[in-house]
Image: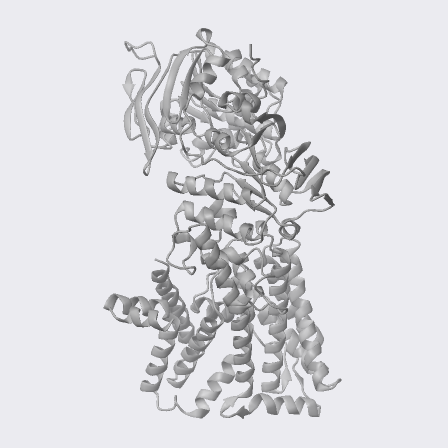
Amino acid sequence: MKNSDSEYRLEMTGISKNFGVISVLENVNLKVKPGEIHALLGENGAGKSTLVKILSGVHQKDAGKVILDGEEINPKNTHDAQVLGISVVYQELSLVNDLSVAENIYLHKLGASKFWMNWKGMTKDAQELIDSLGFDIDASAIVRDLSIVQKQVVEIAKALSEETKILVLDEPTTVFDPTDTKKLFDNLFKLRDKGISIIYISHHLDEIFKIADSVTVLRDGVDTGSMAVSDTNTDGVIRLMIGRELKDLYPTRDVQIGEVPVLEVKDLTAKDTIVHDISFSVRPGEVLGIAGLGGSGRTETAKLVFGAHKKKSGTLILDGKEIKTMTPVCAVGYQIGFVSEDRKEEGVFLPLSIRRNISVTDFTGISGKLGFINTDTEYKNVLGLIEKLSIKTLSSEVDVKNLSGGNQQKVALAKWLSIDSKVIFIDEPTRGVDVGAKIEIYNLINEVAKKGVGVVVISSDMPEIMGIADRILVMYEGTFYGELTKEEFSEENILRYSIGKSLKQVV
Amino acid sequence: MAFTIKQQLSSPAGVLKFLVKYNTIFIFILLLVFSALISDVFFTSVNLSNLLKQVSGIGVISIGMLLVILTGGIDLSVGSMVALLAVTFAILVNVVILPVAIVLTIIIGFALGSVSGYLVAYQRMAPFVATLALMTIARGLGFIYSKGSPITFKTPGGEFMSNFANNATIGIPNIAIVFFLIVILATILLRYNVFGRLIIAIGSNEEASRLSGIKVNKYKFLVYAISGALAATAAVIVASRTNLGSPNMGMAWELDAIAAVVIGGASLNGGKGSAINTLMGVLILGLIGNILNLLNVPSYPQQVVKGAIIIFAVLLQRFESK
């Protein structure tokens, strides 16, 4: 190791990063000692991944310094970072499915090697590496045939195949069962004892307290504190993760919520996703919030009810009548709407005009027997909705790709209002939308609810969901873990449920 | 619409924008003027009606191709389908009365197209692969049923069709009238009918269509079936023109049809294109062939020119999207 005055192996100081006008990181500091496990915590969107990507050369910082072993470094790409000894295991797996385990582990060397590869030697080395981790995987197996847990292990082996000084793990245990998690932890302890610095990103607070030596917390792109784990506890960390003030962003709603639920869901279990045993009901005029961490199954739940995902078992009851089979086509027929979180890919038709976007859900009102469209009625409908939703545009013929994010979102919503939906699922209603349009969308949700529609809002933005929902269901590992009434709303409570903990007892 | 055109033409930049927007019509007119200038024979009724007769068959399948391409797919089988269905029609016209022969041929075309449609929509096969398979199957069946040689029309019904196909009404060849009617029908469907609206929506964003409750599979299935029925119509046209059905007909027509649709400004990713522009694409390709023939340019250089025109047209469309 090089001589340096600092006790730290890695010092990231004053790191700032903007994407366009949005500031993602602001003056963030992260200091990691040799041979320690350092936890990096924060809510969705707090900037953890961006910070790690700056370290690994995926993103370039706008300001600040990264010092490794006393020398300033500036990795331009992941290869630079690897050469410096920084290896990252990302949340989304980055393996090549059609290559073998060994080829994947040494992928970064394949390009740099001489013309001929020593396949046998490579496979042997890979096998030794995996065996040393204590997992049973054949190094010559094709990655496609591995389970997701095995793939994750290969990712970790890949990160260790280099001379690694700093190993970053981004939510490594989400797919692991307790035995595998324990194996992983044992390995991490071994690596730590060898002097490797480990940066560990996780939502599971109990994990952090089991394995980490120190912790840094991010909130909204700012670091709110670094400390030794022995100096803090779960409550202390949660306070650092949240502690934001609710701004006056959320208009109050004056709605008479109906007595009889418009939609009831009983023990719904999905065929192909983690969603299981979902039960809830939504009443006319009610705004029901669904919270939970990324990957807990929120979007999948909405898609399951909407019929876009297949169900294995369970019952749907709309207006007191049981619905046997559900597909998006049926859902539209039953007047159930779904606004996707992925606006560009699943929500709107970017190359088509506003008029064509809005009319797409229903033609019965505007077309005759042979399917010929009565354009006068169509224009009237569409212009009415454009005005009602105050979509800012010169005409109904403007292509949706030319609209701002907020106005695109309104178009996505408009097509469900045009069929007089009884229930609307809105997934991340204000993602990528500026503040002004946010308030308009909240007003719109209120107005829709006022008309007696049952609105289900899914959101990762905790202040948002507390600001607009009447009650909140929190998801954890594919099912509803807890329900919060308006009196119980707090970021801490949502967070506790979404990591599978019970609420703190009020003394 | 009129005032926007006026607005656009009021400035030089506007004129350029206008030309880029309506580039297919512009290229067509340019070629028309150019042809008239360099050849005395071009603007004779004989030549023009020959030109129209030549393009009608490919024109009809191009409309089917357009519908498929609008959904983001492709139909490579249409050329071979023309061969198989021309043979089918020639056999039928010799055994059953004419209307039955025509209707049966179109039904068979629809059924063959349905096979591609089923594979693409319900079995999630890549359109390129499914229709490639249908392409070789149809060509093979054409040779099997005709025993490898052309089948000539022998009945009065066949004679009637041959007369119809080679004559004109008020100066326009009858088969070109059939083609134009199909273009008009397609235009109406695409502009004013739910069917057109939905296939364009599917082509522009299939997942959003699914999540908007559109029966995506049904419409994807239908466009291939319709493409098959239009291939049958084209088969009846070309067989009647030559008084026979041959398994060698429609060779590589699918490529000309794709070229016509692309020259007409449609996007192979789906969601963009119109029947009128496809008509222009068909006429542009036909014109190039015609004028090069009049200038006695041999067929190989003709292919080079055709390819160059396709590149030019598509490059021009790139300006439009900017």
Image-quadrant location for residue A214: top left
Q: Give whichever of B90, A203 is nearer the camera.
A: A203
The residue located at (52%, 47%) in the rendering is: A346
In this rendering, would B101 be left or right of A216?
right
The residue located at (71%, 90%) in the rendering is: B155
Can see residue A378?
yes
Q: How many labels does the image show?
A: 0
Q: Residue furthest top?
A: A230
Can see residue B76?
no
In the rendered image, the vertical position of residue B193 relative to residue A388, given as above or below: below
In this rendering, would A241 be left or right of A419?
left
Q: Give x and y (percent) for residue A32.
A: 38, 15
Q: Give whichever of A502, B184 is nearer the camera.
A: A502
Q: Give x and y (percent) for residue A358.
A: 51, 55
In the rendered image, the vertical position of residue A96 relative to residue A377, given as above or below: above
Q: Residue furthest right?
A: B95
In the rendered image, the vertical position of residue B121 relative to residue B63, given as above or below: above
The residue located at (62%, 89%) in the rendering is: B162
Q: Give x and y (percent) for residue A357.
A: 49, 56
Q: What quarter of the picture does the N terminus of chain A occupy?
A: top left
The residue located at (71%, 75%) in the rendering is: B145
Q: What quarter of the picture does the C terminus of chain A occupy?
A: top right
